[in-house]
Image (spheres, grey):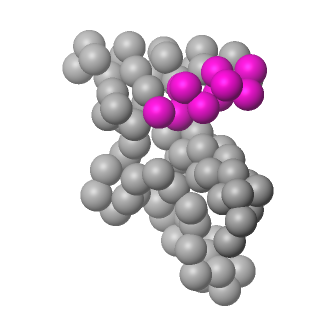
Amino acid sequence: MDFLEDMEEFNIAMENAYDFITGNVTLETLTADLTIQGVESYILPFNPEVENGRDPETLDLIIEHFESVEDYEKCQELLKIKSDSAKV
């Protein structure tokens, strides 16, 4: 695997994480989609069976990624989730 493939996988993982954290994808729909599509994996920077990706460290990693690609709408939504999570 070369650098560009690694970067593409990283970008996919960040997009997937955003969808998962914001509720656009649930563990149930993810599992069903993988089964239907016959795909073996869904790239995420965390294990969705163990955590929901809403811990401060994971959110910071994902926010940093979207800042670097200047996708500030996603940053704003993730920052709101981070703030709401801290209040609980």
Whether residue 65 is situated above or below residue 1 in the rendered picture:
above
Q: Is residue 17 magenta?
A: no
At 54% across and 46% down in the image, what residue appears?
17
What residue sits 70% from the left and 57% below the top?
A: 3
The answer to whether residue 48 is above or below residue 18 is below
**Is residue 11 at least partly visible in the picture?**
yes
Q: Quadrant of the C terminus?
A: top left
| Left or right for 9, reference 78 | right
- In depth, the one of 60 and 84 nearer the eye is 60
Q: Quadrant of residue 65?
A: top right
- Image quarter where the N terminus lies is bottom right
Residue at (32% x, 22% y) in the render: 85
Q: Position of residue 45 (x, y in %)?
A: 47, 51
Residue 76 place in picture, x, y as percent: 60, 15
Position of 33 with respect to 64 (left or right) is right
Say if 57 sits above or below 75 in the image. Answer: below
Q: Residue furthest front?
A: 2
Decide which of 12, 3 is in the foreground and name it. 3
Residue 8, percent across and down? 73, 55
Please state the extent of the stretch shown in magenta in the rendering. Answer: 61-70
Residue 26 visible at all: no
Q: Quadrant of residue 54?
A: top left
Percent from the top left, x then y, of residue 18? Answer: 58, 39
**In the displayed structure image, the side of residue 31 where residue 4 appears, left or right:** right
Magenta stretch, overall SS: helix
